[in-house]
Amino acid sequence: MFADQLGPHFLDAPDQPVLLVESKAVFRRRVFHRQKAHLVLSALRHRAREGDVRLVKAETYAEAVSNPGRARPEPITVCHPTSRAARGLVTRLPNVEMLPPRGFVTAPGDFVTWAGGRDHLRLEDFYRYARQRHDVLMEGSEPAGGRWNLDADNREPPPRGAERLGVPAPPPIVEDEIDEEVRADLDRWEREDGITFVGNDGPRMFPVTRREALARLRHFVEHRLPVFGPHEDAMLAGDFQMAHSMLSPAINLGLLDPLEVIERADQAYRSGAAPLASVEGFVRQILGWRDFIWHLYWYFEPGYRAVNELHARRELPKWFAELDADAVEARCLSDVLAGVRDRGWVHHIPRLMVLGNYAMQRGWRPGVVADWFHRCFVDGYEWVMTANVVGMSQFADGGRMSTKPYAAGGSYVNRMSDYCGGCRYDPKVRSGDDACPYTAGYWSFLARHEQALAGNHRMRQPLRGLHRLHDLDALLEQEKARGSRAP
């Protein structure tokens, strides 16, 4: 079992012998967030205490599997891994049989059949297909409540004047001796092996065992899911969790089967414990978006990660790459970058509309941005971030999976958060000392890519507005002078 395949749904029987590999080479190749490295190693070592499990610590997977501690190599099976590199490794190893993928809902063959012949692949179309295919939130052949999409009910700004949503926090994580051992090993690797990390160490915030993951799932469905929907796109500086499930790290480690998560949410709606809008919004994230992104990783060509239709060529500035939130004055970006630095997690709107939006406005290389998200988020994997960042966040594929760039100015941040009230920049101002970097960056982005976006019907109105700006030339000079400086 790979380190993201740790749950019982990856086994054919509860007592099946398991081989786990802890590879130090993985941490030599990339500079991961310190808390991500801790989470993965803690999960592996906790899983090694359960059942008939052999944990082999080696430099590489190939070394461990070729000589897993016994005189004669035994036949090994493994579920289809989640990256092309890992799949290539599996196909090269002797005595290893690769099984179909698990840990996702829609089968690859079903996705290929659905996608065949479509010029553009859209989440909404796939999501409706998956709802019908798996009979989730359905009433016969019709969607529960008569509507497929309840996004209109789930886009409310944060409650006026609130510092927090006031929902119960998830059950706390209690670290144990394995966590202490992991922390000591990571410290030693940094001192003696030249392995480096980014971000701050801190108390473990996410599950590493199935018991912890199930406790989080139960708590979310009972206490947080009922109020999840309305403010799922909102941001509050004093409440990074809002009502989000924070289950993505556990699901992506394989500790929870996404189908059981979906079924719990569906049952909450059927029993009247949670309103349809909240349940639909949550199910859309798991059954729809998560599966969609997984399948696009394999459906798109291997070189998709390198596509760059908007010709974004700038490198990540040092302050961003190193999570130096203290160098940033823009309150929203500083707070979100600090969240990545301090816990390796922020919810989907800060990822898309604060971090990704800023990167796209500045023209940073999309593949490098995707790699940064992969390394710096505790739930980040190559399959998670490739289409999410390259296609959706950076619009680098020209619209193969998104209908328009997710570009927005300070007015969006002001409407959906409480960040602007305490910021030195003004979201209504686009040029001058107090010009909002997002507002100015938005118009600069449109001007830079006007020709490329001219044929997109969803961008016609913004592009018309571009030529009504009396200070456009000054704005563009201002943004050119800003360069890669922290805003």
Image: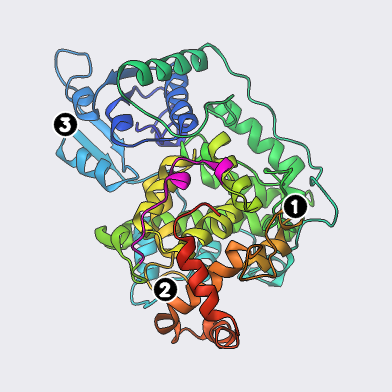
Q: Residue at x 53, y 65 (%)?
A: 127
Q: Residue at x 37, y 21 (%)?
A: 190
Q: Are marks 3 and 1 in contact (CB under 8 Å)?
A: no
Q: Position of residue 475 (x, y in %)?
A: 54, 74
Residue furthest right in the image: 161
Q: Position of residue 265 (x, y in %)?
A: 66, 49
Q: Indicate whether 323 appears above or below 333.
A: above
Q: From the viewer's side, name the closer residue of 259 and 244.
A: 244
Left or right of 254: which side holds 115?
A: left
Q: Indicate whether 434 appears above or below 460.
A: above
Q: Position of residue 285 (x, y in %)?
A: 57, 55
> Mark 3 or 2 closer to N-term?
3
Residue identifier under label 2: 399
Left or right of 214: which side holds 230?
A: right
Q: From the viewer's side, name the closer residue of 371 and 172.
A: 371
Q: Which residues are magenta?
A: 312-327
Residue identifier under label 1: 422
> Mark 1 or 2 closer to N-term?
2
CA distance for labels 3 and 1: 60 Å
